[in-house]
Amino acid sequence: MTARKPQRRREFGTTRQLPSGRWQARYWAPDGARRTAPETFRTKTEAQTWLTLTQADIERNHWVDPDAGAVNFEEYALKWVDERGLAATTDELYRRLLRLHVLPAFGDHDLDEITPQAVRTWRAERLDATGATTVAKSYRLLKAIMETAADDELIRRNPCRIRGAGTEQPKERPTATVAQVDALAEAMGPRWRLMVYFCAYGPMRPEEQAALRRTSITLDPLAVRITEAAPELTTGRRAEGDTKSTAGVRTIHLPAFLAKEVKRHLDWFAAKEPDGLLFVGERGAPFRRSTFGRKWAKARDAVGLPEGFRFYDLRHTGHTLSTQSGATLKDTMVRAGQSSEKAALIYQHSDDERQREVAGGIDARVRELRGRPEEKGAGPSPKRRFG
């Protein structure tokens, strides 16, 4: 009986020349399927080199199924947002950025079709069409989605590789003076003036003020307890819930000059129920952003502040006054409900007047030290020659 020949070991890959003259490479993938290289090669050597590199990727567990990335980006991105469990305002922001800025460019593409070059081209076009801040936010969102796709092993590498593209560089925001804050409060009218003071001297975010109730206020000591926020969505619905971060839950002690303002507002304008909202419209309903915004625009123009000055910018006044009053960075972070030093520093300003005060302080301190006996003669002799 003839001995059975030993079975040949299956080769990893093979090459063959096509009728066109180019070379094709085929290999056995880890899933047991026979795969063909996504491109053909000019020479047999090039095809064999590609096979060698592919085999190395498989052995190092770096191989990615070339069909895995054939997932529609729009479907994946919307599912990505659904699975985040985001706050209502963040969810709304992400969907708006996708709808207006990302999906028009990549919505019809599969994940593996989005290349670094396509991302660079898209970003350059968006910079020409809209503001740099919006583009930075859109880029960060796209990068986060594609990073998850890479973690899911649907793509080999994140195509968003532009250094600094997701960093926002906002312009220095204007700061209202105390006189301007008083003028704004006067122009807003009796019902809304306390909101101006709370934003400037609290400093409380508008969405935090929208959630305040009578029970949030104490008169002795004069303080406000922030426990939740109620931002208004573009649909007009108030999304009542947690504050922006855990640091947002705080007690804010108010300057004593606001005592009369707070008591008058409680007596005249707050909802009458024991737990009623602090700020309501003339008919007792929660104030609307659109209605309040129109009043704000008129007041801002009447005071002479620039058109881009937002109600939110009043927080800069509170931060600046806090630091000028000797508050530490941690003090201002707690007061403003901020969880990072970077966020707190955005609101701190040092204008010319403050710089003159600093220079005056240095001058006074140096004069004081120069007057001490141990400091006299410490400097170089005026007769000393150099060179």
Image (spheres, rainbow, N blue to C red):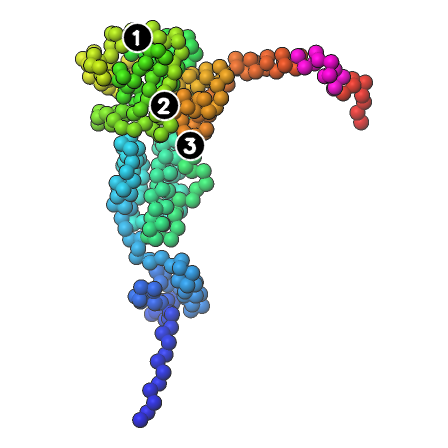
Residue identified by numbered label 3: 168
Q: Is residue 6 magenta?
A: no
Residue nearest the viewer, comparing 103 with 124: 103
Give the answer, above or below, for where 102 lies relative to 373: below
Q: What residue type is labelled 1?
A: Lys
Mark nearer the N terminus (2 vs 1) = 2
Q: What residue type is labelled 3?
A: Glu
Q: Are marks 2 and 1 in contact (CB under 8 Å)?
A: no
In this rendering, would 361 be left or right of 324?
right
Residue identified by numbered label 1: 263
Q: Which amino acid does label 2 sit on?
A: Arg
Mark 3 vs mark 1, foreground winner is 1
The quarter of the image holding the N terminus is bottom left
Residue nearest the viewer, comparing 125 with 264: 264
Disc 2 on helix, strand or loop?
Answer: strand
Mark nearer the N terminus (3 vs 2) = 3
The residue lying at 42 percent from left, 17 percent from top is 318
Question: Which disc is residue 250 wearing?
Answer: 2
Q: Where is residue 276 in the image (x, y as percent from the top left)?
A: 22, 16
Can residue 376 be seen here?
yes
Give the answer, above or below, for where 265 lies relative to 100: above
Mark 3 vs mark 2, foreground winner is 2
| Magenta-colored span | 368-379
CA neighbours of label 1 inside 10 A, class few (<14), some (14 to 19), many (20+)? few
Cα–Cα gap, marks 3 and 2: 28 Å
The quarter of the image holding the C terminus is top right
